[in-house]
Image (cartoon, rainbow, N blue to C red):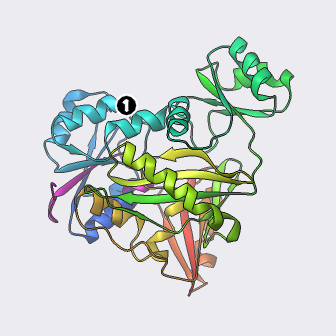
Amino acid sequence: MTTIAPGSTIGILGGGQLGRMIAIAAAQLGYRTHIFAPEESGPAADVSPRWTRGEYDDPHALAAFADGVDVVTYEFENIAPSAVETLAGHGLVRPGAQALRVAQDRLAEKRFVCDLGGLTAPFAPVDSLDDLEAAIATIGSRAILKTNRMGYDGKGQARLNEPGDAVGAWNAIGRQSAILEGFVTFAEEFSVILVRGVDGEVRFWDSSANVHVDGILDTSIAPAGPLIEGQVPAARALARQIADALDYVGVLTCEFFASADGPVFNEMAPRVHNSGHGTIEGAVTSQFENHVRAICGLPLGDTALAARRVEMRNLIGDAAHDWAAILSDPANHLHLYGKDEARPGRKMGHVTRLTL
């Protein structure tokens, strides 16, 4: 087992808010960080001493970056697996490329989970309007059409309610390779967030009940309540299977619907996750610290709740301007990401409220 000692440099692909919070956790453990991203700057630039601007498909830039760090991780999954393979040829990359291959392709992801025995929404591949109409005939017209790749926070999706919606939905996603998913009747949504070490040890944080508004996470609350908690053991068992099958190292998130048939797998994210931001103050060890611990081969920290109730609320767009009112409540913990412009639908920060 390779241990990356404090004082070493962690390379992070992507310089957004997740990279920022990984870098903060890394600094607390004595690590330096180096960001690689195609942008000139970003939220992580405020807290990371080095930033290399480069494209993810530039093997020479990636190789030079890899040679200057001791381990590489990534803050989001929309990176070509070939980039991770290039980096792996020069050193450690955690998690590995296989996690990206599965998570980037919704169809591959659903098939992967089904092969492990997981329950998913009914689905069918769609590569043409004819495929879509055939899938509707099989699955039903109440469904969601999603691009196979590059969709998040509700992007790359179109909702169907009747067969006549097919043409509009197909055009709305840009006539791309897609997957049609049948509607799932569910009561609540929740996340299973785990960390897996290089030795295969797995620890779980308490699952949160997640509420989305306009396809974007609004709040995450733990404990999640009796309905979700009754389905957590089965969901955790599947999430552990996924992590083990991928020989995963780091934090992995699986999202589920709590249904009458049990937990229905929705999607996975091979990274730290928005619904886990409350762990910064709300858990003994945050998802960001444990991600750093895992990728560096350190012992994993305790994931237990540090309060009776933890509520994380995203600050979307102009909501970040309410910082003064937020800070007037001493139970609130405010995190602003340093973004210059507040736009509708843009995550500007989050606030976590603890009930001790």
Relative image position of residue 99 (x, y in whole percent): 39, 40
Vertical comparison of 90 with 288: above or below:
above
- Read off the residue under disc 1: 80
Q: How many dots with numbers? A: 1
Residue 253 in view: no
Circle 1 Cα neighbour tier, 10 Å, few/some/many (<14 / 14–19 / ≥20): some
* Residue appearing at x 42%, y 72% in the figure: 303
Taking the image as drawn, is residue 66 in sight?
yes
Queried whether the magenta region covers residue 18, the answer comes back as yes
Q: In the rendered view of the protein, which quadrant contains the N terminus?
A: bottom left
**Relative side of 303 to 189, left or right:** left
State the residue at coordinates (23%, 65%).
298
**Magenta range:** 1-19
Who's the residue at 43% across and 41% down the image? 77
x%, y% of residue 221? Answer: 62, 69
Residue at (49, 77) in percent of width and height:
305
> Is residue 181 positioned above or below 167 on the image?
below
- Quadrant in the picture for residue 176: top right
Whether residue 299 appears in magenta in the rendering, the answer is no
Q: Is residue 259 left or right of residue 272?
A: right
Secondary structure beneath dot 1 equals: loop
Picture quadrant of residue 222: bottom right
Residue 49 location (% of width, % of height): 24, 57
Name the quadrant of the C terminus. bottom right
Residue 329 position in % (x across, y down):
61, 84
265 or 276, which lies in front? 265
Amino acid at circle 1: Ala
